[in-house]
Image (cartoon, rainbow, N blue to C red):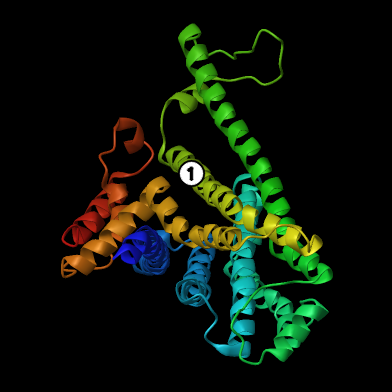
Amino acid sequence: MYDNITTTPATNSTTDEQWHNVVTKVTISTIMIFIIVAAILGNLLVIVSVMRNRKLRIITNYFVVSLALADMLVAMVAMTFNYSVQISGKWLFGRFMCDFWNSMDVYFSTVSILHLSCISVDRYFAIVKPLKYLMYMTKKVVAIMLVVIWTGPVVLLLPIYMGWYTTKEHLEEMEKNRELQECSWIANKPYGIISSSVSFWIPCAIMICMYLAIFREANRQEKALFTRQGNAMLLHQNNTNGDMLSNSGGSSKNLTMHEVNQGLHHTPTKDRNIMKMKREHKAARTLGIIMGVFILCWLPFFVWYVTTTLCKSCYNPEVLVTTVFWIGYFNSTLNPVIYAYFNKEFREAFKNTLECIFCSCRRRSSDLDGLDVRRPSIRYDDRTRSVYSETYLKNIDRRSSEYGSSL
């Protein structure tokens, strides 16, 4: 009896530790499953929404759809194998699948960041060099860029299957243990430096340079627009005789009353240009946020990767490895959330797609497309009527009435 009493505290301690381990494993498992499912469904929603809504079928979104596909494959291939390791505590699939998992992990993460690099180049031309954008960023050019994105990182896969990526000691250990119980990633210095530079450091440097130029140009355009509108209003208030106006500094740039009125009054062409500029700036902001989140998610992993590659004796706990991997994986889940929160057009497209899924999809998939068709039927004021003929307006009204039944 006394023996039972003395062993009870130890037994309780062991039981508590077991319950703590179970609760920890269940919590971690739930978080990982959520990240995987959210990444798959969220990125699938992006792809389906762009396919269903013509308004989203612009050149930039070709990259977005391709990026969503890469993120979805990260969830389906890389995350699932990592999840099995975290739950079972060992590798269950043999040597070849270990190399396959490592190679696909490297491949898809590289593909993702190359997509973001191409998106930053696309936004650079759209905002900084808008006159050259349509000439350079054609569908053919975009297709070539996407082919390069998906085929270029293949060069990083060959060293993994040939055993050139790791150290000699690690390779010998894997050869001895045919029944592989652990699939660890140990890269040698040449492969670690080259792969991290190609996959992260060089593309990130390109993206940062591009977005710095983009935001400088966006701020310059907005300031120039507000300055011109403010000067036009000021000149209109102080001068009503229609004579030539000049500024007090004797500048050679003069404004007539006709130019002032053009600055004050809205015309369809000017409104379209302003709306286009705002859309480009909004897209640049959204994609800039995506780039920033990507860097924040993957920077810890690549810092760990380079550090452990160069310093083999550094402290490297298993919990740190798991954390940096899953923070990087979490980026694949965040991109659709960023689209929905910061981009109204994507938000409307997501809402429309989900309504079709959960509400029997009674409306046609072109509901959002009709918004663009209805815009010409907005009531025109007297200034607009002086630009468009009455016949043209009647044709537009007739077109809008034809599409009205579908809205």
x%, y% of residue 291?
A: 58, 51
x%, y% of residue 164?
A: 79, 81
- Identify the amino acid type marked 1: Lys
Residue placed at 71% from the left, 57% from the top?
315
Residue 186 visible (yes or no): yes
Mark 1 crowd level (few <14, some 14–19, many ≥20, 10 Å Cα): some
Residue 53 visible (yes or no): no
Residue placed at 72% from the left, 11% from the top?
250
Choose between 21 and 83: the one closer to the eye. Answer: 21
Q: Secondary structure at mark 1?
A: helix
Q: How many marks?
A: 1
Q: Quadrant of residue 38?
A: bottom left
Q: What residue sits right under mark 1 in the picture?
A: 282
Choose between 272 and 103: the one closer to the eye. Answer: 103
Residue placed at 28% from the left, 38% from the top?
380
Indicate left or right for 320 with 158 as reference.
left
Above or below 96: residue 407: above
Indicate left or right for 281 with 403 as reference.
right
Residue placed at 16% from the left, 70% from the top?
360
Q: Can you say which quadrant of the picture contains the N terminus?
A: bottom left
Choose between 125 and 100: the one closer to the eye. Answer: 100
Q: Can you say which quadrant of the picture contains the C terminus?
A: bottom left
Above or below 251: residue 350: below
Choose between 280 and 393: the one closer to the eye. Answer: 280
Q: Residue furthest bottom?
A: 178
x%, y% of residue 213?
A: 68, 42
Indicate left or right for 377 with 79 as reference.
left
x%, y% of residue 361?
A: 19, 69
Q: Quadrant of residue 197?
A: bottom right
